[in-house]
Image (cartoon, helix red, strand yellow):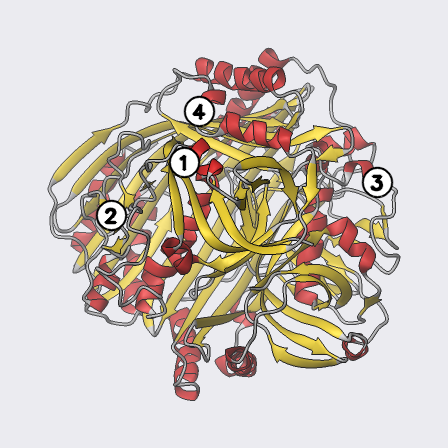
Amino acid sequence: MLDDLISGKEKLFSEGVHTELRAQENRSRSVSLIQGNLTGNVRAEVMGVSARVYKNGVYGFSSMAEYTPSAAEAVLQAATENAAFMDRHIQKGKGALPGIPAGSMPCKKEIMDTEQKRYIEFCKEVDAYIVDKYPKLSSRSVILSADSMEKLIYTSDGYNGHIASPRSYIYVFLNTESVSGAPLELFKALGGSGNFGDRFTDPALLFPEIDKLYERLMQKREGVYPEAGYKTVVLGGILSGMLAHEAVGHTVEADLVLGGSVAGPNLGKQVASELVSLVDYAHTALGKPAPLPVYLDDEGTPAEDVVLIRDGILTGYMNSRETAEQFGVKPQGNARAWGFSDEPLIRMRNTAVLPGKDKLEDIIASVDDGYYLIDTNNGQADLTGEFMFGVCMGYEIKNGKLARPILDTTISGVAFDMLKTVDMVSDEMTWSSSGYCGKKQPMPVGMGGPALRCKVMIGGR
Amino acid sequence: MEDIKVVSNRISDTVGRLGVDKAQFSVAQSETREFNVEGGEFSLFRTLFDNELALTVYHQNKKGSAVTNKLDEASLEAAVEGALASAESAIADEAYDIAPGQGEMCFHDSGYEPDLDRFFERTRELLEDIGKRHPKIMVKQVTAAHEKSHSIYRNTNGTQCEVFRGSYTVSLMFAGHEGDKTTSFFGAGVRVDDLDTRFIELGMIEEQLKDAEAQLETIPFEGKFEGTIVLTPDSLGELLQSILENFAGDPVILEKTSLWLNKLNEKVADERLTISLRPSDERIVNKSHITGDGFQEEDYDIIRNGVLRSFMLSLYVANKTGLERAKNSSSAVVVEGGQTPYKEMIQGIKKGIIVGRFSGGQPGTNGEFSGVAKNSFLVEDGQITGAVSEVMISGNLADMLLNLRDISKETVADGASVLPYVAFDKIVISGK
């Protein structure tokens, strides 16, 4: 864990400006076994200090790849000079940011390291299980990724804090060939928030998930292309979570609202069926710890939940301190930075569609002709809310029953149109938190949702 | 700041002292100066000072790597010891290796030192040019950065490559905006090593701004047909990346899942198509000089006149498979222009769409793709008849290269690649 070498540097903060000083270390450990070949075996540690200064409507930022008291002094001076440079050239003439309550946030999580040997041995055991049990696969990969962010944050007004957020995943990729000889792949990310040792105690505990993945891959061998067109579908929780993040979440990030997103003119309006509510959770969701808990952001704002859609009405945006002032609301802890040399940006935390009252089996039984879409390998959306998600696992629904599996396809729609077609919502949540959200910087995020019955465009051949 | 020549000597000494069989490393110091524009207004000025050491050791046919940005003596020692410990825990494989000695070399980019005041003025001029020439454009974000780095690559076979690298990059995200109407977002960017030209005139920036304004009036696309798509240089670049990763990259050759696995020296594309990786091309800025395995980079063709000439393999996968390694590890894709002017290419199309951006599921190893043709325009009877929305395209990347219809005479160089407009037939195009 980081020793505090920057405490006391607050006395160097300039008067009349808002200042943040941050020390940070990002660690990652990775192991890649492709066909049993160890292609990656890397331990990475990146640390340094940064400072950001807000003056009259513009920011100055500076960072150094050193974690020393003198480096902290140097970045404070450089960030102050950079803010002055921008103020001199741009002259926005805005006032200071409104103050927020001050306080101190203690560290709630320890980062524990694991020997590389343990990571390799664990992956080898998982790989050996796959080889032994499923020899007919055309190929397989086992990829381990354990990363962590640890930050010491000091602000001129707001909370100071020490935060640590480790996460650990094992990705299993299985490949086979379709009945026509074309390559087919499915993957599963196993793991979540926490240190590797907390998450992964015994490789055997992963085997049931691998068995399920293999079973789906074998079903997919017999898959058919879906019929292209505008169809009734049941979106599984992984896909409704992606919808919450990609197609709605980004459009209600206040910087993108100011950039012209579709959410701008829709605040307070009906944008979804009244069955749909959507929240960006900070650290606790539906009475349980959120997938990737966030307690404090990098501007010193304690993190709170942001209700984005309530009963179909667009109710709010996610903000930084600067955009919160512009919209006349209070910031709720969404300004986060990925590395020590990154400035805080408005980012989601754990964004989810809320569960409803329907049972998944009743939703499927209600569809005469459509698709049940379970898993995705990719998703994008833009400022209009138009989205595209790759679908890598799903089934036809015929007369209320699951029928043939489908081959890889894509679904698309416009979020605020598509959400109005939601007429059934399941009572169970599915969360995911592997991977990164990309918005100038990467950022770990959680997303989740129930199954939704709705209408989307589906691609085919 | 540590002197990286001293740092590289320390690492070499530690590697020698620990008796490591082989090792290679790259150590770099970098400085970034970056202006940010948010919502059309300057918002942030950043200066970043960073270091990086990336080290791989090979011991008793085992491999381990370490990455750190701490270059003090104790951290360097810890990095080498950590990489060695990782290697000792690893799986032995005789295919791990590094390049034989390539000698000593040094390269110095012309854009190494920034002219910060002029760079700021060029960026401000870009915003003014957009405001004057394209009043219906809402600029979401501009990131204008000068990055310079001084790096040294060394390995235990005696290679040393010192590079002073520097260039300016400008990337924009914007949308057409009028009243309550907003288009999809557009992205454009260039990398340059001088500031001689107005930014708006570089790469596809002006073209993209015009397209964004035209997209304010779109008609939903209806129906389904098999037709022609014209990929702009930007969208061609995206799909080429998928093609090369899915059919020619390390993992798919090692896993034997590539559709091109047994097609070396066979036809895999129309004979008019040549796809090269050319880091030495004068239109490429920020040239790479040494591969990840320590070979001095050379240009090469992946596909020449429609025939597959090479995969993009590391030395490790080349040793595992007996295939030839890639002659460079750059992403400097060059596809030379064809014979037909772009205008004539469009005039020859009966029915199809021009695809500004492909937003689709990541194609898998079978090459199947389907996704939304964003920022697209309908072509009917040789005329661009309007902007369309909610269009999906689907096909197979491997088949698409064989169904090439035409390559434009014009090419666009953005500093990272050189690409023409390319038309492909037999793509399924569908709407609501």
Q: Where does the image place residue A304, in percent across and percent down from the top left?
A: 77, 49
The residue singled out by tag 3 in the image is A267
Quarter assignment of residue A188: bottom right
| SS of the residue under disc 3 | loop
Q: Residues within 10 Å of mark 1 (few under 14, many from 20)?
A: many
Of the numbered discs 2 and 1, the one sitting upstream in the chain is 1
Q: Is residue A448 above or below residue A133?
A: above
The residue singled out by tag 4 in the image is B202
Of the numbered discs 4 and 2, the one sitting upstream in the chain is 4
For marks 1 and 4, give the CA distance. Answer: 29 Å
Query: Left or right: where does residue A114 sit relative to residue B372?
Result: left
Q: Which amino acid does label 3 sit on?
A: Leu
The residue singled out by tag 1 in the image is B50
The answer to whether the residue labelled 2 contacts the one labelled 1, judged by CB atoms less than 8 Å apart, is: no
Which of discs 2 and 1 lies nearer the camera? The answer is 2
For marks 4 and 3, give the CA distance. Answer: 38 Å
Instruction: Tell if the residue under mark 4 belongs to the same chain as the one under mark 3.
Output: no
Q: Which mark is residue B301?
A: 2
Would you say residue B119 is visible in this rendering?
yes
Q: What residue type is labelled 2?
A: Asp
The answer to whether the residue labelled 3 contacts the one labelled 2, judged by CB atoms less than 8 Å apart, is: no
Of A222 and B120, the residue lying toward us: A222
| SS of the residue under disc 4 | loop
| SS of the residue under disc 1 | strand
Q: Residues within 10 Å of mark 4 (few under 14, many from 20)?
A: many
